[in-house]
Structure formats: C-alpha cells, structure tokens
Amino acid sequence: DWSMSDFLTEAKGAIRTMVGDGMVIGAVSGGVDSTVAAVLMKEAIGDQFHAFLVDNGVLRKNEATEVMERLASRCGVNLKLVDASEIFLQKLKGVTDPEKKRKIIGNTFIECFEKEASQLKANFLLQGTLYPDVIESTSHKGPSATIKTHHNVGGLPAHMKLKLIEPLRFLFKDEVRKLGLELGIESESIYRHPFPGPGLAIRILGEVTANRLKALREADKIFLEELRSAGLYRNIGQAFAALLPVKAVGVMGDKRTYEEVIVLRAVKTTDFMTADWFDLPTPLLRKISSRVVNEIRGVNRVTYDITSKPPGTIEWE
Ligand code: XMP
C-alpha cells in the first residue's frame, strides 16, 4: 500500500525528530494497537524505546510468553516482561464487584508502571491511542465510557512529567492494521480480537481464584482454537469464554457433580458500541461443549450467549 508506506516513512522521521537522543517507554499488551505502535518505535529509534509487558496474573493461557516471543524474539522490540501476577492476584482476593476489579487492576498496573519508569530515565511515554479514542475521550459521546470505566486513555500520573508520544492518533483501526502489515507484523497479531485490560478478572464472575482461573484459561483456549481451525476467527469481532458465578448439578458415571458453568460469547461487530451474537454452526458448538466438559476438571456445563448489544454488553462484567 503506497500511502501506508509514505505514512510509515513520515512517521519514523517525525518520531526521530521528536525524540532526539531521548528515551521512550511504553507498555504493550500484545493487542493490535500496542503491537503496531511498539514495532513502529523500534523501527524509528531502535533501543531508545523500552517496552514492557506486565503479567497481571489474569492473562490468557501462555499469553505473556507468546507476546514476548512475537514482539521481542521475532520483531526485535526491546521488551521486558514484568511478572506482577502474584501482586495482582493477592489484591483481587475476595473481590467480586466488577468495577472494584477494574480499579484494582488499573491502579496496580499504574504502580508497576511507575516502578519501571523510575528505573529508566525516560522522557517520553508511548501510547497506542487511535483516532476514535481521541474523539470518544473529547466528545463524551461514547456510552461505554460512562457505563464501565475504561482506562486505555489517560490514567497517567501527573507527577510523571513524561511527554506523550502517540504515533497512531490520526489512524482508524483498519489503517493501524495496514500499517502493521507494512511493518511486517504477522497477521496473527494484526487480526487479533481485542482483549480487555482487566483481562480474565472480568470474565470470572464472582471471585478470581487459582482454580477458577485455570478452568477459564483452558475453556478460552479450546474455544479460540476451535474457532481458528473452523476458519471462523476472522469473521468474528470478539470471542471468549467466561465463568459464571453459579454452580450447576450434573452427573458423571454414577456420581452426582456440582460444578462450574462456562458461557461462550462470540459477537459480530464493527465498532464494539453495538454488536450482534454470532450464529455459530451447531456441530461446532457441540464439539466445543464436549471438549470443555471432558477436558476441564471442575466444569460440567456449557452455555452459549445469544444476547445482542444493546441490551447486553459484550463482556459480562
Ligand atoms: P462492552 O462489554 O462494554 O465492551 O460491550 C466493549 C469493548 O470494550 C472492551 N472492554 C474493556 N477494555 N478495559 C479495556 O481495556 C475495560 O475495562 C473494558 N471493558 C470492556 C470489551 O472487551 C469490548 O471489546
């Protein structure tokens, strides 16, 4: 794409001019925006960019390792893994309120960030802000901004005297994807479904415990694996499994069971402000359900969410 290659050349030049011989830090999640922003920085200023990935203990199965592999090993980004999972999980103990979970995760993330930032003498902070984020945060029109607290924009402590660098702030999502392809990022990263900052914590309804995390990680992995092998992943806007805060009675062999319930959610959406549930083929649902109950200890029931947004939201919390 000629226009994207022009954009790339210009963006790199602008970043170099802005940064000079300064240092930039930035957190990456492995999502499309932070991945593209990080690789762009690496292309522009190499190791003057210091990225880090915070393992908050509520990432999906193998996610931290996979992001490290993709961004550090394959793209050459100067990326550090900060394993803070114990701290996050300790703070989440006993917490069931969704907004409290979000606050704990948001605040703990900022603490981790400040700790990393204070060790480096950075002058700039990279943010993967896109044009729609800019509009939503200035017009106050986005209903999701008031319904749930999102913390992708802002949240930067005032005393941190870092200048913001937002190389994607004039781009829409599809343009970020094009830029990512131009940068040679593999399509698995480019077309990845969004994953919320509070991670699996808001997909475990009720308390986040080690056993429940383990069960949900497995269920989510099976679900996404089956969607990919059925060739449906890219037709879906977002898909995930969640763990309900109820137990259900079941039977296994000649024994009564009383175990966890998984709900599968897959939606079609363009802007995530509205969404429709995705009509998955019955044989695929059958396969996923039987894998989930057979392969995961402690789960005896699988349900499929057939609610659109509105009135539902995409997430359950
Ligand atoms: P809802 O559930 O509001 O989700 O329909 C819309 C989109 O936003 C994501 N989401 C979040 N992302 N922090 C995030 O970074 C959050 O607290 C959060 N809550 C929801 C959700 O996954 C979907 O893509």
Image (cartoon, helix red, strand yellow):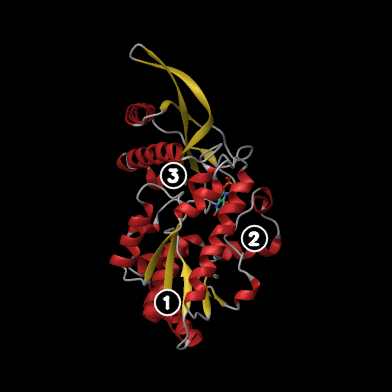
Question: Residue at horizontal 38%, vertical 13%?
Answer: 255
Identify the residue position indicated by label 3 in the image. Answer: 236
Residue 164, position in %: x, y?
56, 75
Residue 179, position in %: x, y?
41, 68
Kindly tell me whether residue 141 is visible in this rendering: yes
| Callout 1 amino acid | Phe
| Callout 2 amino acid | Glu
Identify the residue position indicated by label 2 in the image. Answer: 136
Left or right for 64, reference 208: left
Q: Tag 1 or tag 3, which sits nearer the N-term? A: 1
> Quadrant of the image for the N terminus?
bottom left
Distance between the Cα atoms at labels 3 and 1?
A: 33 Å
| Callout 3 amino acid | Ile
- Rate crowding at label 1 as few (under 14), some (14 to 19) or many (20 or more) other CA atoms within 10 Å: many
Q: Residue furthest toward the right?
A: 140
Residue 146 lies, with reference to residue 314, above or below; the image says below
Question: Residue at horizontal 64%, vertical 49%?
Answer: 148
Identify the residue position indicated by label 1 in the image. Answer: 49
Does the residue at mark 3 contact the one at mark 1 (Cβ under 8 Å)? no
Left or right for 200, reference 65: right
Q: Tag 1 or tag 2, which sits nearer the N-term? A: 1
- Residue at disc 3, secondary structure: loop
> Quadrant of the image for the C terminus?
top right
